Image: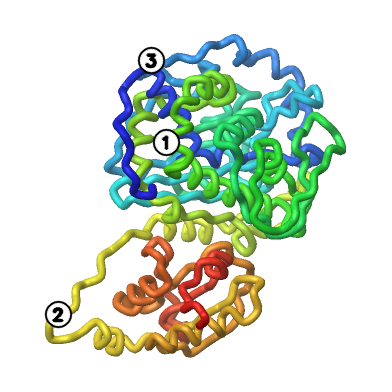
Amino acid sequence: MNGNSSQPIKSTDWTKRGLWAAFLISALITALLAFKGANNKTGTPSPALTDGVASSFSDPENIQPTLDNDRLLQGNSDRPGFKELNLDQTIYFLLTGLDKREWEGDTGPGLTDTNIVAFLDVQKQSAGLISIPRDTFVEVPKYGPFKINQAFSLGEAYGYPGGGPALLMESAGNLLGTTIDYYIQVDFDAFVILVDSVNGVEVNVQEKILVDPDPSVKGDMKKLLPGKQLLSGDLALGYVRTRGTAEGDFGRTKRQQQVLIGLQKKIFSYEVLPGLIPKLPSLYQELYTHIETNLTLSQVVTLAWAVKDINPQSLQTTVINRPLVEAGFNSRDQYVLFPDIERIQKVWGDMQQVAATPVPEPTQEITLDEHILEENAKVAVMNGTTSPGLAGETADFFIANGFQITEVGNSDKFKDQTFIYDYSGNPYTIQALLDLMGYSQTRLFYRSDPNSTVDIVIELGADWVLENTFPDPE
């Protein structure tokens, strides 16, 4: 939120419907980013998993949504059921996008080719997202090892209690060591509708990229050039679906989270939100056949108000990438990513430990500068961007402000965001660095490494290139 106030909104049915839509847009929009490239057919379940299955499913087009506060928005009776909402505890969501490939005549249950697990901690005012690549080889309860994007199809095909969503929730939860509370599932159309409803989303395109705005039209490719661009719904869809870059699926998951953050910022901007509210009734009518969840309307309204004050900048995002997974082939000769479960669960756990812990106030006998000198922290500055010399320039800036920089170098991979890692407990130095850089404690992580030669590591991300606090040249 940007701190601007607005007039109270009357509590009408349409307002509740609008809040439902706004909540999905802002807090759980990641589900809308889970889309598969139209030309990629790898990872499809064997014919035994799809043949003759479609006739057993409900037709969502023939099921009207309910607006009752205590009813679930679901088009199939075999789904995860109601669960009480407790804002005093961390809440976990599974966010997926279902690719039914209807333009190719596919009538099976479909695949969920990108799966994102989100957490929300209202008490700490923190939230985070972890993207699980489609090829991650996981243990699917009752059925054995499969790619994670096949779990939904298995659950639908073989009548698993709670259907595909329940089996996918368990599979993803087992990987992360988390019990997932709620699922939200959407399709292509919902994504385009939502982006267009706010007149597009601004993203900073990192490299020249070809995107496919409409998967039903073959060969209609569009070129996006590097730099900040305002993308319409169809172009944004192509941007988050394409795998045609050097990073493949890993790059796609980064773009999904990039669009998520951009869209969340725009939704809750003072310029957009007032104009969006009058559109909410028609937006709801367009969306309801494209979204499914085991949240009730009253729960969604409650979550909407709980989420609205969380700063989008505090949203933590990460992608399960190498070395957390290792590429290889399974016994069925399928390309898969073998996960290091222990390390993945450590990363997921660390994300949830970030909290804005207040720094102890200095006493009158010792000043803040003296506290920092007493800590005598050794700081390393690493460049995770494509801007040469950024680490050295930043190190000089820190030295000029009294910090002890003992190492300057390059990060092992590109970073979208800047993060600070504290290895030995230096609260005053850390807070002073955060204040100098203009960041909150959501950028701070704690690590333990007895072999570390420094106390603090600062990994500079692409955001620091544009948002650094260097003094303006005279």
Question: Disc number at residue 68?
Answer: 3
* Left or right side of 148 for 210: right
Query: What residue is disc 1 on?
Result: 181
Q: Residue 209: x and y, percent?
A: 77, 53
Outermost residue on the right side: it is 219
Which element carries disc 1, helix, strand or loop?
loop
Residue drawn at 46 percent across, 25 percent down: 278
Q: x and y percent of residue 375 in the render?
A: 30, 86
Say the numbered circle drawn on residue 363.
Answer: 2
C-alpha separation, residue under disc 2 versus residue under disc 3: 56 Å
Nearest-to-viewer mark from 3 and 1: 3
Amino acid at pointer 2: Thr
Amino acid carrying label 3: it is Asp
Distance between the alpha carbons at the discs numbered 3 and 1: 21 Å
Q: Residue 92 in the image: x percent, y percent?
A: 42, 41
Sequence-first tag of 2 and 1: 1
Q: Quadrant of residue 304?
A: top left
In terms of secondary structure, where does tag 2 sit? loop
The answer to whether residue 225 is above or below residue 170 is below
> What residue sits 68% from the left and 58% below the top?
227
Q: Is residue 153 visible?
A: no
Category of crowding for the residue at label 2, using alpha-carbon neighbours closer than 10 angstroms: few (below 14), some (14–19), many (at least 20): few
Q: Earlier in the sequence, mark 3 or mark 1?
A: 3
**Are circles 2 and 1 on residues that touch, CB within 8 Å?**
no
Q: 180 and 342: which one is in front?
A: 180
